[in-house]
Image: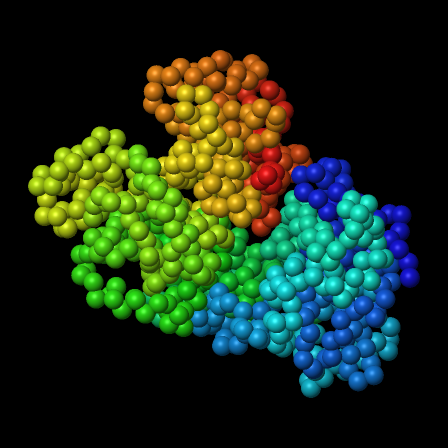
Amino acid sequence: MGRPGGDSLLCPEIFGEFEEVPTRLRTAVADRLKEVAAARGGLLHACGAFNALYFNYCPRLRRYTVEPDPDAFITAPVGGPLSALPVGAYVRLTRGTRELWGEVAAVLGAREDVDRDGWAAGALSGAPAVDGLDQQRVIVDTEVFGPLSQSELVERGRWLRPGGGWQDGHLVGSVPSACRDVSARDQTGSFAAHLAGPARPLLDLGPLPSWLWEENGEVTEADIARAVRAGVSCLAQIMASSPGLHVWGLYGRSAAESDAFAASAPAEEVLSAVSRPAPGGHARYTALWPLLDNVVRGIERTEQLTGVSAAALAVDANLALANAVTHRMLPAGIDVRLDDRWQQGGIWRAQPLPVDSLLAGLDPLSPAGVGYAESEAAAKELDSATAAEASAPADDTSRVCVVHVDDELVVLTVALSASDLAAGRLELGRSVLALLPQGPLILQLHHDGAVLPVALARQRVGRAGASVRRVVWPQGLLPGTRLTVAAARAGRRLTATTVLLQAPEEIEGYGTVLWEYEPAMLVGATGSVGPPAPDGEADRQPSLRPSWRPAVAALEHLIIEALKRDGENGPADSRRLDGVRLTAALFGSDIRSPALLWTVIHTCEDMALLGLLTQSPAPQGGPDVFTWWPSTPEALHARSASSWDAPDCPPGQPLSRRWIRPQRRRLPDGQRPSPESRRDYARWRIEVEGTEAETELPPGMTFVHGHLKGSGPGKPWHRHVARREER
């Protein structure tokens, strides 16, 4: 058995942060992975990219130069029950005494309850893994260890015949979920667990165990799994930054071949089918794999449904749909969005406009599983207290308005009804609760201008219908009091605050009101005479999908309350935190989302521009520090003395005004962006939005990265705040 050859690009940096990989190495790795993808049918998963570097896949020879021990492969009988087969796993396909070797190239969900034209039941879209069994379609590449011999080709041909047990070169069956420590849908986690466990002998063919030993002195299974996860994640980001690849999830696809499909007749047929709502104006859910199978067989191109070509076809279809949604190339009056990335290669949702506020604010490429959340099956799992809510008077229900939703964050305002105050409820709506993890939640409650006891400020609450229950409200809250509520979609903490009015209001027949409120609800509950609602208040719309991580104005009060509660003491009773610790204070220290971190940082920067906070560099480098100041003469004096004067910038000018924000700029006709601009744009989108961001510059545009005015190219704005683990 050999070891990786001298031309291997594998190095310790690959198992670290994407930002720490030298630019020259990133470029070399990206070029190699493009060659690997081309040699393997134009498709490469990030786990396969890990194998390609670790076992030194040679695109010219179309095989690995390191020959692994087949005893460490997973045995998968053709036509028999499946084992756990993550993407990237090496398998031995067996049928009687015959066998072929291969590598898992793709895994898709394969539950039934879909029609041939792709129609899928809403309850299927976003449905969680079934306890015990979950259907999957596993696609195996049998040519990664070199071209097949004549006898192997004959044997594979027998298997592919009707009744041969290997329909179109796919393995379809149920996988026991209890046999693994991670979800079958987490391909990176399954792959890492596989290499750290039963396939550990494969890793000994390369340097990872010795590198870990040199670093830690001992190597555990958990250490190996973490390192493999980090390596796959880093390679995924390198693939996403490569202009020659289009990336969907963790699948990299040849850009040229993907673009060719997008311009084809099958792509038009797929777009037409997916963008067709159900009769009666209801939402239709379309599963891509059966739709593609039907379309391709109709034009007698069945070779596209075989082996790796089938997985590439599914990725191409998703990329074409994503491009149509992003660039609004859809029939007028129809909302189309991805609802489930896993099941049947992807399930898309279409309905007539307008959509409700939740969907209007949700990134259409963020799979929220709305179909399952709205299905009758999901509704049956809700608490029986829903019936009590339905019997409440129509004019005594809390008013919920979603003001921002993306794939990391949901922000809403809630005007509390008298009955919810009395019953200890906080209504959020079923759609919002469906976006958050199942189980109990933590309510971090702020009362603007007041200090709450610990028992009130942090409460453990439970779900019930469209609400959370067992809330203890502070004394003196009025019916109609408006809360701003925010939650990270991956966390269990709800952060909520009341907001003081700029000036107290006198309500005839009631008295003085100090906090923002809904006038109609207060009038209905107390019989008082309230002032008219401000112009435009009823027409406030949720934010639309941004082109980058946006500032979220609705977070401003929550940020200030978090600084006042958890911030470090500064001059004149000011409170300060850097962006990382502020994000943890808002949403919990268990949240490690760079995208959510950037949302908080951008909001703080806009608040600094408005004068609500100040922004300064950390004393010893690292993330910038944001400071809240009380409105006292001492604080105003200390604030003016603490401004950060960067080189070549006017003293006393707010920090945010000194930055050139990153932006796309239109080029004169006939000019093209430089490779450096394309690379900087891709890096910026990945670091701000994550590995699934669209990294291609629009035609006719170039990219200007952000920097301090007067500093020249300098350090890019999007890298100014360094990521670090909370200590």
Residue 47: image quadrant is: bottom right
Q: Nearer the viewer, residue 173 or 239?
A: 173
Q: Position of residue 385 (x, y in %)?
A: 30, 67
Q: Position of residue 725 (x, y in %)?
A: 60, 41
Q: Residue at x 68, y 47 (%)?
A: 234
Q: Is residue 445 visible?
A: no
Q: Position of residue 298 (x, y in %)?
A: 57, 74
- Identify whether 415 is placed above or below 146: above
Classify the position of the N terminus by image quarter.
Answer: bottom right
- Identify whether 39 is placed above or below 574: below
Q: Is residue 366 visible?
A: yes
Q: Is residue 410 left or right of residue 108?
A: left
Q: Nearer the viewer, residue 330 or 593?
A: 593
- Identify whether 314 is placed above or below 594: below
Q: Is residue 370 left or right of residue 724?
A: left
Q: Residue at x 86, y 47 (%)?
A: 7
Q: Is residue 407 left or right of residue 259?
A: left
Q: Residue at x 10, y 44 (%)?
A: 528
